[in-house]
Amino acid sequence: MIPSRGLVAAVAVVCMSVAGIGAARPAAGPAARPAATAQAHASRAAVHHVGALTGAAATVTLGQKVAVPSYIPPQSTAAWSSLIASASDIGFLVANVANGPGPAASAAWQPIITQAHSAGTKVLGYVDSGYLGGSTPPRKTALGDTDTISWLVQAEQDVDRWYAYYGSSMDGIFIDDGMNTCGPTPGSNGYVDLYRQLNDYIHGNHPGSLTVINPGITVPDCYEDTADVIASYEGNAYDYLHPTADRAAAQWQLDGDPAKFWNIIYDVVPDGTTIAAGNTSQAHLSDVMQSTKQNNAGYIYLTEDTLPNPYDTAPLGQFWTDEIAAARSNSTAVPSAPCAPQVRGHGGVYSTGVDLSWNSSPSDNIVGYEVFRNGLHVGSVGNYFPDRTDFTDTGLTPATAYSYTIAARHRDGNVSQQSAALHLTTDIAWGNPPSAPSNLTASDVVANGARLSWTASTATNDPVAFYDVYVDGVRRATVDASVTTVHLGYLRPGNTYAVTIVARTTSDASSAPSAVATLTTPAPAPIDNPLVDFGAATTTFTATFNLGFAIKHVYIDTDNSTATGFTYQSIGADFMIEGATLYRHDPAAGTGWGWIPVTLASGPLTTDGDIGQPTVWQVPSSVFDPSARMTVIFNGVGADTNNPADANADSAPISSARAAS
């Protein structure tokens, strides 16, 4: 049990000068390390317990940052102006173009992302991890796969597309639909190992990125190293104040670094608003904010918005003012700079990373530390007093000089000046390069993807850690050494590609590229074979989607009038199917975008076909009473082709008369 730090009267901290440290390479190479080393500290009880603060710490309220899942249309100028003007109080914004980056940089989103970044707000790109295929039923990737490796590869490609489209205006990645168990079976770590690998991929290939994962629920501490920040709650306000056992803040969150946790709460109402008796979704802003501080959440988001999409608007006016004010601390203390970090233990500097350690602060008010590599922020870690605080940085280049500093973070959110620097040089890539992967083949070639398979490389004194997949000389994915087959997407229809595979060892020694595999993708119509059967009892909508679209729509005009419904192409859509949900157009939206979910006794019964296979929706025809005829357009959004022309694809309008009963 960790003693209360309030009982520590005074602790003298002695700073040791450390400079020019580099690790000598043993004759047989350094000790083996995991292929994917997480950028954080292994889980252990630490920092402070919010229920047991003592002395001055008990009077300091937690300083928080508002973090916004801003799935807000770029044309909502008032919302975006408000968010950009509040940059100093916002920890980060999440941009979501089309359930991901979309097929090309968006002309509408580009200025928004640039303005928010320029104002000082971190902008994160939305990446769907699909629960790594572990949900029931399993989610499918754009290429129709449900296995964990296909989801990892698609996520890596989405990460790189965000940075390719928006460059230096991107500050990190938000990984949505995260699993909440360590692995698929008790005692396994299959899920967290892949999330750690994705986290390391982001940090290694896009240095300085902030990573956030969203299980949306309490997770075990095996998730500590899966991202910089964990969204440990996403739900309504009433449930937040009255959580079930599986949704209550975990002890490791209560004892951990506040900057590790984000709580997202919708259906919050302003103080003074009357909440109807029996309401089980709403709660008042001040009550929810107080609970977020008790739950040790360093990032928060409260909104009045509600399901089905609580994130397509931004809090405005007095509600937003009150939320920002409540997030601030009652303290303005700035801590002193800590001592310089040191290398942890013998062999703490290796070819691709470094193990750092430093004396932890005895003060309850020092809740964490920020770590900087060559002046670039590369991570945060809690204050592990009375133990030393540790941090592992990975993704480094062999035989390269680096400097490291740390800064202390006060409970009120203020950060100290950076410490003196630790200078070091990474070890050389000491291992012998492995053999080149062989027998590379491409199969299952479709308009926007292909399955790649190869024979594993062999190694001598340094084991293979990764395989990098290159398309036309550009790295498109990385998998660990156990994987020799990937299903690669985001290819363009009608193009010829040259693919190679390179093996890398634990010390970053690379093989020669494999022999080139050449493939040519076909170029079918994006959507074909549209059919509507307006039956007496059931209406069936069928179309073949030949690209991997992020979103599939069916727009349905039931009154043959463009004066009503959402104006789309040549019709006025009175209904819309998106995914597996049916919506009725909201008359309050005029002829613009606005929808109300339709509750059905059954349906839309969906058979979501793979690429090139029919997708079928079935809806009770009674929903469309008293219509006698309908006109339909099938639509796909965000095809994974890296081709702007495929950003939005439609079928030709087709009509169907209602069958006689």
Image: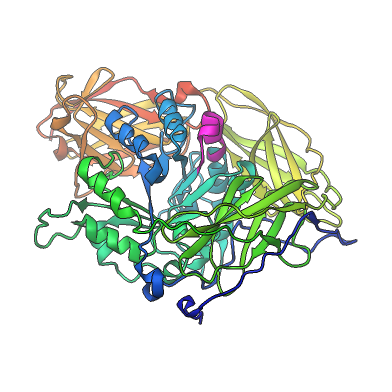
- In this view, the residue in front, 511 or 486, is 511
Q: Quadrant of residue 207?
A: top right
Q: Position of residue 94 (x, y in %)?
A: 41, 41
Q: Residue at x 62, y 64 (%)?
A: 390
Q: Residue at x 28, y 62 (%)?
A: 290
In the rendered image of this protein, does residue 115 appear above or below residue 399? above
Q: Residue at x 15, y 39 (%)?
A: 623
Q: Is residue 631 visible?
A: yes
- In the image, taking residue 388 as reference, residue 137 lies left or right, namely left
Q: Quadrant of residue 616?
A: top left
Q: Is residue 191 visible?
A: no
Q: Is residue 219 within the magenta segment?
A: no
In the rendered image of this protein, does residue 440 appear above or below residue 570? below
Residue segment shown in magenta: 159-172
Q: Position of residue 53 (x, y in %)?
A: 40, 73
- In the image, taking residue 492 as reference, residue 85 lies left or right, namely left
- In this view, the residue in front, 408 or 136, is 408
